[in-house]
């Protein structure tokens, strides 16, 4: 079975002495990695990129975002994406692993930032002309530190990442692209639910399973999800199933029946009806629309 490529940091010519972090000028990054950026792929790390110049599109999990000066994108491990540019981009990009951040930034979690908090939040932030200057200076400082060989380099990089994220999170929170989280307890439960769904959606589709995992009742779980997202737990589970279906249909080259079975549906006819219910297209029609 074919799979969507999953790239690690060293695939991008990262400094092997710091294989958990990478930073580059976007021009140089694209020049060095021509074989990656225009084809759908995944990463096993976190990615943040600022475009100070250039135009194009950035497709992330079948959602298309416009690239213009001031566009910032945040990707979590496992998301499928690619870029297409109309005019030459400028800016900066950095990657890091989960462990790199949490090893050097004590008492902080990546998930505290709204753009990494939940997949429901937009993976994009559009900066104003005034805001671009501050963020670009943060990214530039990261880039220059990455190129040095000074003592405490990893600690300095982690500190700069955290500062950049704090600035971006403040700007993100002023926009209208964030889902409101009703309480800290609900926020923690939603993160655990999202992780559990990510680990088990191929085999487990019932609300009861996830409620048991979280040690709460299905009714209470639905109450939390509805208060947080305005949707049901079943909606959230099925959204993840359908997203993976789309990824495999378009990018894997596997047969539709194989894809159905890999997602826990031995009856392809049932899978096809479910897919159409959620997307208004059959799997075959969806595949044709991307061919």
Image (cartoon, rainbow, N blue to C red):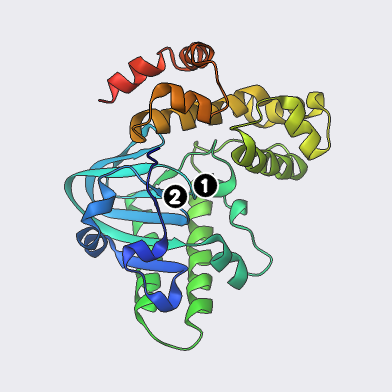
Q: Residue furthest bottom?
A: 151
Q: Can the viewer see residue 232 in this picture?
A: no
Q: Is residue 34 left or right of residue 162?
A: left
Residue situated in front as seen by the camera: 21 or 225: 21
Q: What distance separates the C-alpha of mark 1 from that of mark 2?
A: 7 Å
Q: Are marks 1 and 2 in contact (CB under 8 Å)?
A: yes
* Residue shown at 38% from the left, 32% from the top: 62
Q: Does residue 224 lie above or below 162 as drawn?
A: above
| Rendered-image quadrant of the N terminus | top left
Q: In the image, 187: left or right of 274?
A: right
Other-residue count near label 1 (Cα within 10 Å), few / some / many at <14 / 14–19 / ≥20: many
Looking at this view, is 187 or 254 the one in front? 254
Q: Which mark is residue 138?
A: none
In terms of secondary structure, where does tag 1 sit? helix
Label 2 sits on residue: 74
**Residue at image location 69% in from the left, 29% down from the top:** 225
Q: Where residue 284 sits in the image (x, y, percent)?
A: 36, 16
- 108, 171: nearer the viewer: 108
- Residue 139 location, x and y as percent? 38, 65
| Residue 189 in sight from this viewpoint | yes
Residue carrying label 1:
115
Quarter placement of the C terminus: top left
Q: Residue at x 41, y 22 (%)?
A: 256
First in residue order: circle 1 vs circle 2? 2
Where residue 6 appears, as percent x and y from the top left, is 41, 50
């Amino acid at each position: 079975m074919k799979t969507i490529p999953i790239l690690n940091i060293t695939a991008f010519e990262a400094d092997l002495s710091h294989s958990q972090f990478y930073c580059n000028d976007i021009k140089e990054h694209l020049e060095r990695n021509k074989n990656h950026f225009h084809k759908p792929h995944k990463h096993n790390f976190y990615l943040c990129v600022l475009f100070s110049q250039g135009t194009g599109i950035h497709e992330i999990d079948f959602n298309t975002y416009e690239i213009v000066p001031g566009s910032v994108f945040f990707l979590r491990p496992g998301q499928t994406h690619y870029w297409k540019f109309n005019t030459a981009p400028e800016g900066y990009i950095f990657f890091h692993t989960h462990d790199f951040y949490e090893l050097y930034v004590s008492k902080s979690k990546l998930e505290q930032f709204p753009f990494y908090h939940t997949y429901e939040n937009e993976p994009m932030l559009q900066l104003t002309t005034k805001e671009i200057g501050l963020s670009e200076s943060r990214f530039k400082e990261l880039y220059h530190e990455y190129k040095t060989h000074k003592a405490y380099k990893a600690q300095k990089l982690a500190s700069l990442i955290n500062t950049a994220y704090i600035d971006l999170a403040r700007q993100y929170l002023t926009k209208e692209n964030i889902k409101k989280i009703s309480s800290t307890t609900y926020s923690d439960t939603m993160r655990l639910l999202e992780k559990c769904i990510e680990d088990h959606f191929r085999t487990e589709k019932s609300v009861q399973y996830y409620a048991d995992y979280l040690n709460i009742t299905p009714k209470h779980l639905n109450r939390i999800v509805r208060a947080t997202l305005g949707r049901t737990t079943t909606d959230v589970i099925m959204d993840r199933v359908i997203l993976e279906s789309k990824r495999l249909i378009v990018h894997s080259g596997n047969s539709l029946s194989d894809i159905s079975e890999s997602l826990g549906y031995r009856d392809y006819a049932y899978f096809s009806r479910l897919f159409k219910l959620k997307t208004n297209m059959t799997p075959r029609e969806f595949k044709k629309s991307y061919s």
